[in-house]
Image (cartoon, coloured by chain):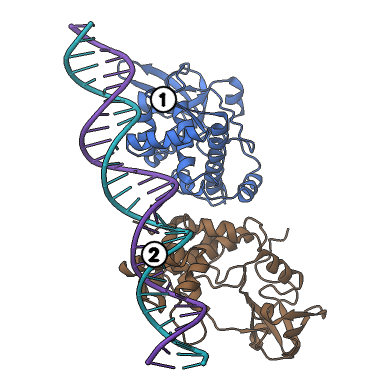
Chain colours: A brown, B blue, C purple, D cyan
DNA sequence: GTTGTATTTTTGATTAATCAAAATCGCCGT
DNA sequence: ACGGCGATTTTGATTAATCAAAAATACAAC
């Protein structure tokens, strides 16, 4: 009776899906859950009813799902495994940050507590994974910080990329090429509402443009302390230099 | 259509089961397969028929199963993943050799080719895992060496433990305590057929007794080269000293 | 208010893997 | 050669997860 991979995935997606909801909303519509999981709507409904039965989610027919405390705890441990594994694959195994997601997606369901603790220890109890996503604590605690995005942050100030909220390898490689990995510094030169784009200036003073959709996937830390602490060119979690 | 974990497990157990068959036999009885997998006999029959349909095994009703060439190749890649993972957990993650089996049992079904290649490379393309079991090659080739056991090897000569054919943690810890890990030297002082036991002398000249059942699980290399090459006290694949 | 549309739920089936228990088979021993 | 017993196969059901398509529902628009 450990939860099946399927159950773990549902809980994980409910957690992530609720996080992406517009401010104020707390119920994830079934359609969104179904498409995040790549299953038919009816499948999600059936499964969610079962999860509600087990006390892992609250389910309001026609309105959506939300995690209970127990469900949140479980989702957090899955996310913890996923993110620790991703960071491990980058830092220890020397894999690229854009190629670790799929392996992590599978490994998150099978690594034992003993092994995940070993990984956590080996990485020095890290707080975030290579994409800047927070790593939940051992007891299922998640500290989600709030960030601006390149679409909402003040123009002209140097900000530090904190998190990239898209796992697509193509996008991640693009982000890397432009020096936008978590930990790297950038500033918004201008923002053009009409053109739906932002003008950016990287640490090396090169400028480039990003569409609004892409810009909104780059979460940034606007506090002065962050800018001060940031390494000018190299991001965190880079592959081990030798 | 990658093979399911279940299929991989069936193929793996057919491979291992056939290996344990008395000399001459090549067909693994369904009962043995079923109990190795922990399923009811009928379940094994049903599944094996399906595997035969897919051309992975030869199935002779009432006689047993055997792998086809295709089945052998698949079994080898599963075994390769399992054994590389076990060695990785010991060498890189610093886990004990008696606690890695269960993790490997799960991981063997989910590690990607890319990751397993990375592990293989990181370990320097090892030939055997911590228990001395051979690691199949990338292309599904398995080189099984033939070994004597402490029950059949010559009395009085120094031999090198090559392989321990039992994954039980309790037994493995016992083996370790007595300096019988793969790579370590031992010699048989005497063998008593009636008492069903062997008198052993370890590298440090301590003597102890092993029952026949246990002795037969310790495969040894009796060639003089092996004895010459062996480190007197430390076995291969020991945890990284620091 | 009625109606339309998009979303959600229901329904009925399917697939993979399993079990328990009944039926069957192979073969050993006298 | 035959009876019986242990191993194997069959049978009938079950569980988890899924889909397609039909039915129901919510809500916004008119």
Residue at image point 56% right, 27% down: B144
Numbered badge on residue B236: none
Q: Is residue A68 visible?
A: no
Element carrying mark 1:
loop
Name which residue lies at 41% across and 76% down. A66
Q: Which of B150 and A54 lies nearest the eye of the viewer?
A: A54
Residue B112 picture location, percent across and down: 59, 50
SS class of the residue under badge 2? helix
Q: Position of residue D9 (x, y in %)?
A: 35, 29
| Residue at image mark 1 | B216
Q: Quadrant of residue C10?
A: bottom left
Query: Is residue B56 shown above or below A51?
Result: above
Q: Residue at x 36, y 38 (%)?
A: B43
- Cα–Cα gap, marks 2 and 1: 50 Å
Mark 2 packing: few (<14 Cα in 10 Å), some, or many (20+)? some
Of tags 2 and 1, the one toward the viewer is 2
Q: Nearer the viewer, residue A16 or A120?
A: A16
Image position, residue B33 (x, y; %): 39, 32
| Residue B135 screen position, x and y as percent | 57, 36
Question: What residue did someone put label 2 on?
Answer: A47
Q: Are marks 2 and 1 on the same chain?
A: no
**Residue C8 image-quadrant placement:** bottom left
Within-10-Å neighbours for mark 1: few <14, some 14–19, many 20+:
some
* Front in this rendered view, residue A138 or B4: B4
- When the figure is inspected, residue A201 is found, relative to residue A111, above or below; the finding is below
Rendered-image quadrant of the C terminus of chain A? bottom right
Q: Tell me if B179 is positioned left or right of B210 in this view.
A: right
Q: Nearer the viewer, residue A151 or B145?
A: A151
Which residue: 55% across, 84% down? A146
Q: Is residue B65 above or below residue A242?
A: above
Q: Is residue B109 above or below residue A24?
A: above
């Amino acid at each position: 009776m450990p939860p099946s991979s399927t159950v773990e995935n549902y809980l994980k997606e409910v957690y992530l899906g609720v996080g992406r909801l517009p401010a104020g909303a707390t119920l994830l519509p079934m359609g969104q859950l179904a498409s995040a999981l790549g299953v038919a709507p009816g499948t999600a409904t059936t499964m969610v009813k079962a999860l509600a039965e087990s006390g892992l989610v609250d389910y309001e027919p026609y309105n959506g799902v939300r995690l209970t405390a127990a469900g949140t705890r479980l989702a957090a441990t899955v996310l913890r495994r996923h993110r620790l594994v991703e960071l491990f694959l980058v830092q220890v195994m020397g894999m690229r940050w854009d190629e670790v997601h799929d392996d992590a997606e599978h490994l998150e369901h099978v690594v034992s507590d003993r092994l995940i603790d070993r990984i956590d220890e080996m990485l020095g109890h890290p707080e975030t994974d290579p994409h800047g996503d927070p790593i939940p604590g051992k007891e299922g605690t998640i500290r989600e910080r709030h960030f601006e995005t390149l679409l909402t942050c003040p123009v002209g100030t140097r900000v530090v990329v904190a998190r990239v909220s898209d796992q697509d390898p193509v996008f991640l490689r693009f982000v890397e090429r432009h020096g936008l990995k978590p930990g790297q510094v950038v500033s918004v030169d201008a923002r053009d509402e009409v053109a739906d784009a932002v003008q950016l200036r990287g640490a090396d003073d090169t400028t480039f443009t990003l569409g609004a959709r892409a810009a909104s996937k780059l979460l940034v830390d606007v506090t002065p302390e962050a800018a001060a602490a940031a390494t000018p060119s190299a991001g965190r979690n880079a592959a081990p230099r030798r």
